Amino acid sequence: MIPEFTRSVGAPRIAAIAYPMAHPLGAPGDREGQMAVLRATLRALEEAREPAEVVELPFEWPERPGQVHADPAEPPPIARLLARRPWLVAKFLSGDIPEPQDWRAS
Amino acid sequence: MEMDSYRYLNRVTRAAVKAWIKREPYREVPWRPLRKPLAHSTVTLISSVAVAMRDDQPFDQDKERRDPWHPDESYRLIPRDATEQDVHLYHLHINTDFGEQDLDCVMPLRRLKELEQAGEIGRSAPTHYSFQGFVLKPRELLEESVPAMIHRMKAEGVDAAVLVPV
């Protein structure tokens, strides 16, 4: 997933894997592949010696970025909102999240 | 760091994550060594895929559709024997077909039980957990959901929790 982000929010130990979103352990039905990822993750848990240590797992996803199907069938609500109101993208990027009762006024 | 962890992200998500990383304040990392070997440890999984048992209350997708900035911040309990037949996945930002087809590719409960049977972990906890991962400003998640999950983990003697993103 995205170890730099996970590290920035303070996770104690991080097992990093460069797989697409939506199937972090591997492909459906790939019992051996999933087991390998889980085992390596737990090994990282045992072997990490320092806070926020990142262990890069030795797995490569076989598909190119254009071949994966990690996105949902319909765009998520935030994507639709930002497409309709592009001036809100700055808030999205800066983390200036509107309060629950204020979003309609944005 | 050698691997390209951004390889599969689209441009907008990539830009957002990089911006968020830059603005995260420094925080001390909560950390302690493992108190016992994994082979003697109770392990639980926490998935951000928003999975719920079919006989449990669904995650509120309409809440997120009404207010895209503030999704459902509740959590669900997933028993150790749950499979894809018993659950539904409610995450709106990823293709949930993979996890619906085989729960282990997002929440490896069967794999964890196999590690228990092989003696590589002490046991898979009786209860595992899920919440909705896309929470930009976690308030209820941190003040209510997380303490409740921790309380139950302590009651079940959990030694290690593996957070599994999607």
Image: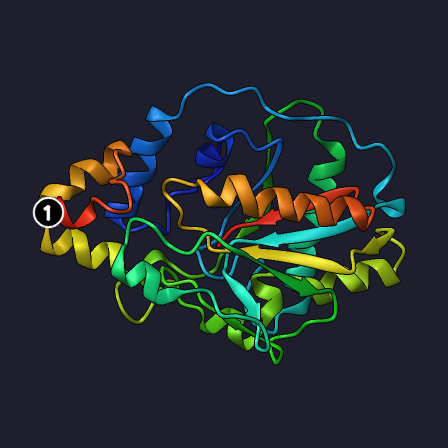
Q: Is residue B162 visible?
A: no
Q: Residue at x 74, y 70 (%)?
A: B81
Specify whether A84 is left or right of A98: left
Disc 1 marks a residue whose amino acid type is Pro
Write down the quadrant of residue B113 in the picture.
Answer: bottom right
Q: B95 or A39, which is in the foreground?
A: B95
Q: B89 or A105, which is in the foreground?
A: A105
Q: A68 or A91, which is in the foreground?
A: A91
Residue position for label 1: A86
Q: Residues within 10 Å of mark 1 (few under 14, many from 20)?
A: few
Q: Indicate the position of residue B156 as horizontal and vertical percent values.
A: 81, 51
Q: Indicate the position of residue B116 as horizontal and vertical percent values.
A: 84, 59
Write down the quadrant of residue B102 in the picture.
Answer: bottom right
Residue furthest to the bottom in view is B85
- Residue B78, above or below A12: below
Q: Is residue B52 visible?
A: yes
Specify whether B81 is left or right of A13: right
Q: Indicate the position of residue B159 as horizontal and vertical percent values.
A: 79, 42
Chain letter for mark 1: A
